[in-house]
Image (tube, rainbow, N blue to C red):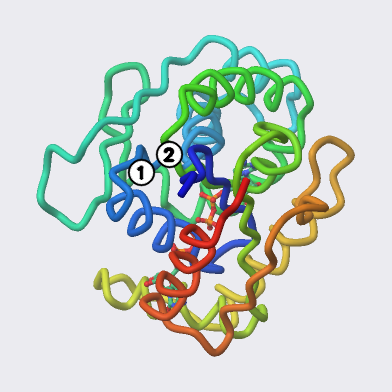
Amino acid sequence: MHRPSTITVDGPAASGKSTLAQALARELDYLFFDTGVMYRAVTLAALQRGVPIDDEAGCTRLAETVKIDVQPPSVDDGRLYDVCLDGVDVTWAIRKPEVNQNVSPVSAYPGVRTALTEQQRRIGQRGEVVMVGRDIGTVVLPDADLKIYLDASVEERARRRYQECLGRGETADYEGVQAEIRNRDQIDSNRTVSPLRPADDARIVDTDSMDATETLTYILGLVRNHDG
Ligand code: CDP
Ligand code: CDP
């Protein structure tokens, strides 16, 4: 059997991409790489350094100059990996509501995307990788061996994110989480450069009525039956 070496997982917020990709990478002994952390890290840098979110040139300069590192987890606190921004651990800081609210406008800037896409492509082209994002199958790795597009209704995705916040001991409000996800869906799907959409050759998987284990089992079936 010819195992797919580059696997892409795209889809909207909280469709289960990272959960699936992490488990799949562990199963196949591949690298798991979540490109969302890069857009989040640039957004955090802008917020911390006082670069206005509507300053396209300023945000682009940050994307071109900050050093983003993703490494195996060094702390046992539920994290999947460490994210460092210019040497500082920002693993949880990039999940703050302020970042959630500002990451989509920053990600829509063409210069930001060019800078980050280049780094992602270099990592992806080494193979044996499960790469997660919005445009991995369409733009970053258009020649990937297996492309997956995970979807779920906005109500179900908001429920998952809401539960996740409660599980971390944070206070959350379901309506607020849903509004934030809707807003990001809208910006991510309608931007001019690399909008969120399934690649023509992607396998679209609706996870509304599937839990994480069922999704993994289904995708492992696609991997095994892959004939590329
Ligand atoms: O985990 P969640 O789906 O909430 O978000 P994420 O994957 O961490 O991505 C955060 C944001 O980064 C998305 O809403 C997009 O605006 C942007 N993003 C992108 O534009 N392209 C990617 N390849 C990955 C993320
Ligand atoms: O990476 P993405 O934003 O697409 O989603 P995720 O972070 O993998 O999943 C968001 C939340 O939904 C996590 O708490 C998962 O445990 C949960 N989840 C679920 O309830 N059912 C699934 N089929 C997949 C994920």
Comparing 225 with 155, the one in front is: 225
Residue located farthest toward the front when viewing the structure as drawn: 1
Q: Position of residue 225 (x, y in %)?
A: 53, 62
First reached walking from the N terminus: tag 2 or tag 1: 2
Graded by Cα atoms within 10 Å as few (under 14), some (14 to 19) or many (20 or more), the crowding at tag 2 reads many
Q: Position of residue 117 (x, y in %)?
A: 64, 25
Residue that numbered label 1 is attached to: 93
Q: Is residue 14 placed above or below 109 in the rendered structure?
A: below
Q: Is residue 24 placed above or below 75 in the rendered structure?
A: below
Q: Residue at x 65, y 60 (%)?
A: 149
- The three-letter amino acid code for the residue at tag 2 is Phe
Graded by Cα atoms within 10 Å as few (under 14), some (14 to 19) or many (20 or more), the crowding at tag 1 reads some
In what element is the residue under mark 1? helix
Q: Residue at x 75, y 41 (%)?
A: 138
Q: Residue at x 47, y 33 (%)?
A: 41
Q: Position of residue 204 (x, y in %)?
A: 69, 67
Quarter assignment of residue 141: top right
Q: CB of residue at label 2: within 8 Å of ligand 1?
A: no
Q: Determine whether, in the image, residue 132 is placed left or right of residue 106.
A: left
Q: Is residue 75 placed above or below 20 in the rendered structure?
A: above
Comparing 80 with 54, the one in front is: 80
Q: Which quadrant does the C terminus fall into?
A: top right
Q: Determine whether, in the image, residue 104 is placed left or right of residue 121.
A: right
Q: Residue at x 40, y 75 (%)?
A: 212
Residue that numbered label 2 is attached to: 33
Q: Determine whether, in the image, residue 206 is placed left or right of residue 3.
A: right
Q: Are marks 2 and 1 in contact (CB under 8 Å)?
A: no
